[in-house]
Image (tube, rainbow, N blue to C red):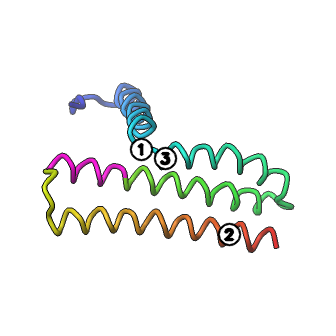
Amino acid sequence: MANQNAKGLKRLINACFFSVAGFKATWTHEEAFRQEVILFLISTPLAISLGETTIEKLLLIGSVVLVMLVELLNSAVEAVVDRVGLEHHELSGRAKDIGSAAVMMSLFWAAITWTLILL
């Protein structure tokens, strides 16, 4: 459990360690996140070379970063739902479906961004 009394620099250092642990857990347990990181590693050099302006480059890269951010949040929701119970429950299924829909929307947004900028 996090040290609730940590303040200032110690709190920031603790937060960094917790964030790294979150990235490691997501990388280990979520194949979709690993795929999105690979997509990011491939698309970033493409965005840098294909984007004509700094804004275009940032939009191309940012749209893929958005996908990874939404995936992190979706993975957190799924982990909490699974922690509560693995038996089927309508609300648990709904929470997971909504998280999945958010990831899909971010993927569509990335595809639209790339298509409109590159065309």
Dot 3: what SS?
A: helix
Q: CB atoms at circles 3 and 1 under 8 Å apart?
A: yes
Q: Main secondary structure of the magenta part?
A: helix
Which residue is denoted by mark 1 in the rendering? 30
Q: Pinpoint residue 4: horizontal percent, then vertical percent.
A: 21, 33
Indicate the quadrant where residue 26 lies.
top left
Q: Residue 33 carries which label?
A: 3
Q: In which quarter of the image is the N terminus?
A: top left
What amino acid type is highlighted by mark number 1? Glu
- Write the residue at 41% across / 69% down: 101
Nearest the eye: 55 or 5: 55
Residue 11 placement, left or right of 91: right
Indicate the amino acid at tag 3. Answer: Phe
For the residue pair 15 and 40, the one nearer the viewer reads as 40
Image vertical order of residue 13 relative to residue 77, above or below: above
Q: Give the range drawn in magenta.
A: 75-84
What residue is rendered at 13% in x and 51% in y? Answer: 85
Q: Distance between the residues labelled 3 and 1?
A: 5 Å
Please tell me whether residue 106 belongs to the stretch shown in magenta: no
Q: Label 3: few (<14), some or many (≥20) within 10 Å? A: many
**Camera-nearest label, 3 or 2:** 3
Q: In this view, does 26 lie to the left or right of 113?
A: left
Picture disc at residue 113: 2
* Label 2: how many Cα within 10 Å (few below 14, some 14–19, many 20+): some
